[in-house]
């Protein structure tokens, strides 16, 4: 009389990460059987499960070296996470994380560095250089001042001029 609808089992869905603005975040993967030699640059997150030799520059994005990943390269990214092996210097704009299974031989430069118990690391860590940008001091602005003038801090300026027109005290 009444037909009962068969219950459907929900299928798993992939939900890619979203950016703070709610947009879907792009992510590229170098598979376990892939070997890349050269310079990698781009505008999306990267997961390395294969082999990479050269340089990886994704300054505004994240780089993850997966458990099967083998990297012989300098890596520059916003956040770097290592679960596999890296031989090269790592430059994290925000942070570098070496997971328990991670093996790194190279220098780490980031404002925040985390080494999980069980990870292997050989190199140096510089957290100070990454925290502060070195800014060149501005050259003092030249201004014409008349003798007896008052400066911004209400201190009188004294200028002595000899007969040649050069200034001296």
Image (tube, grey):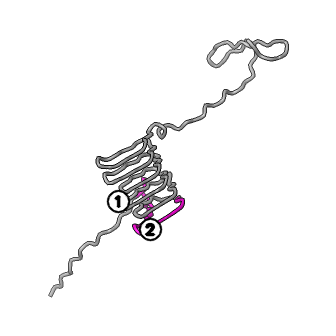
Q: Position of residue 61 (x, y in %)?
A: 47, 54
Q: Position of residue 119 (x, y in %)?
A: 32, 49
Q: What residue is shown at x 81% (from left), y 12% (from top)?
A: 162
Q: Which residue is mark 2?
A: 34
Q: Position of residue 139 (x, y in %)?
A: 66, 29
The foreground one among 132 and 49 is: 49
Residue 165 magenta-drawn? no
Considering the image in quadrants, where does the N terminus appear?
Answer: bottom left
Tell whether 43 sits left or right of 163. left
Residue 32 magenta-drawn? yes
Q: Secondary structure at mark 2?
A: loop
The foreground one among 37 and 136 is: 37
121 vs 155: above or below: below
Label 2 and label 1: CA atoms lie apart by 14 Å
Please rate how many residues cluster around mark 1, counting C-alpha atoms within 10 Å: few if below 14, some from 14 to 19, many from 20.
some
Q: Which mark is residue 67?
A: 1
Magenta stretch in the rendered image:
18-40
Q: Position of residue 93 (x, y in %)?
A: 47, 46
């Amino acid at each position: 009389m009444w037909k009962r609808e068969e219950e459907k089992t929900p299928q798993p869905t992939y939900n890619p990460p979203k950016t703070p603005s709610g947009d879907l975040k792009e992510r590229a993967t170098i598979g376990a059987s892939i070997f890349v030699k050269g310079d990698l640059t781009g505008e999306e997150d990267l997961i390395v499960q294969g082999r990479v030799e050269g340089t990886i520059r994704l300054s505004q994005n994240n780089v993850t070296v997966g458990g099967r990943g083998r990297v012989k390269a300098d890596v520059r990214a916003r956040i770097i996470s290592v679960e596999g092996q890296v031989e090269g210097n790592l430059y994290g704009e925000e942070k570098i994380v070496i997971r328990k299974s991670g093996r790194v031989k190279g220098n780490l430069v980031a404002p925040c560095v985390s080494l999980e118990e069980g990870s292997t690391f050989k190199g140096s860590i510089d957290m100070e250089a990454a925290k502060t940008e070195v800014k060149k001091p501005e050259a003092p602005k030249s201004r014409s001042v008349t003798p007896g003038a008052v400066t911004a801090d209400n201190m009188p300026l004294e200028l002595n001029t000899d007969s040649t027109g050069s200034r001296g005290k």
